[in-house]
Image (cartoon, helix red, strand yellow):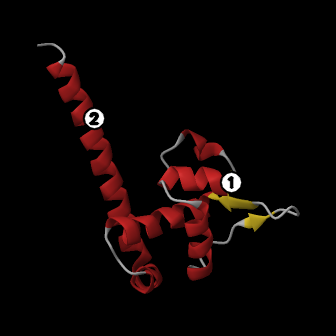
Amino acid sequence: MLNTDKELKLYYSIAEVAEMFGVNASLLRFWEKEFPQISPRTTGRGIRQYRKEDVETIGLIYHLVKEKGMTLPGARQRLKDNKEATVRNYEIVNRLKGIKEELLAIKKELDGRD
């Protein structure tokens, strides 16, 4: 599900995850409290380290809350009841975004030929 160059990393900092989704770190910390599926490892210095699974869950939450406009309780229930369908929907949306970006790049290239 991760579509970044950082996909091979074992852990991601809160700043990296916040940047991936265009949110601030305080929102991520809030989501940690609201969604038990997010369980970052904390170092002895109190630094959060998100696993790939955490980042994927955050992506699903972002999709449900920010893109689909669901409430936190609604998103929590959706992930609990029907995570597989949510994952499929999220993957389809991401593929469509990729196709859109490709088409816009082709259009830009064609417009530049005039």
Residue depth check, mark 2 versus mark 1: number of the one nearer the observer: 1
Decide which of 15, 102 is in the foreground and name it: 15
In the rendered structure, are the residues bearing label 2 and label 1 in contact, judged by CB atoms less than 8 Å apart?
no
What separation in Å lies between label 2 and label 1 (alpha carbons)?
Answer: 29 Å
Per the image, label 1 sits on a secondary structure element best described as strand
Q: Which residue is mark 1?
A: 13
Crowd tier of the residue under label 1, counting other residues whose Cα lies within 10 Å: few below 14, some 14–19, many 20 or above: some
Can residue 1 be seen here? The reply is no
The amino acid pointed to by label 2 is Glu
Q: Which residue extends farthest top?
A: 113
Q: Is residue 85 left or right of residue 110?
A: right
Q: Residues within 10 Å of mark 2 (few under 14, many from 20)?
A: few
- Residue 61 is situated, as x and y percent measured from the top left of the image, at 46, 70
Tell me the amino acid under the disc marked 1. Answer: Ser
User: Vertically, is 106 above or below 81?
Assistant: above
Dot 2: element: helix
Residue at horizontal 81 percent and vertical 65 percent from the top:
46
Residue 98 in percent (x, y) is at 32, 43
**Residue linked to disc 2:** 102
x, y (%) of residue 1? 47, 54
- Which residue is at a point 45% across and 79% down the rendered structure image? 79
Q: Earlier in the sequence, mark 2 or mark 1?
A: 1
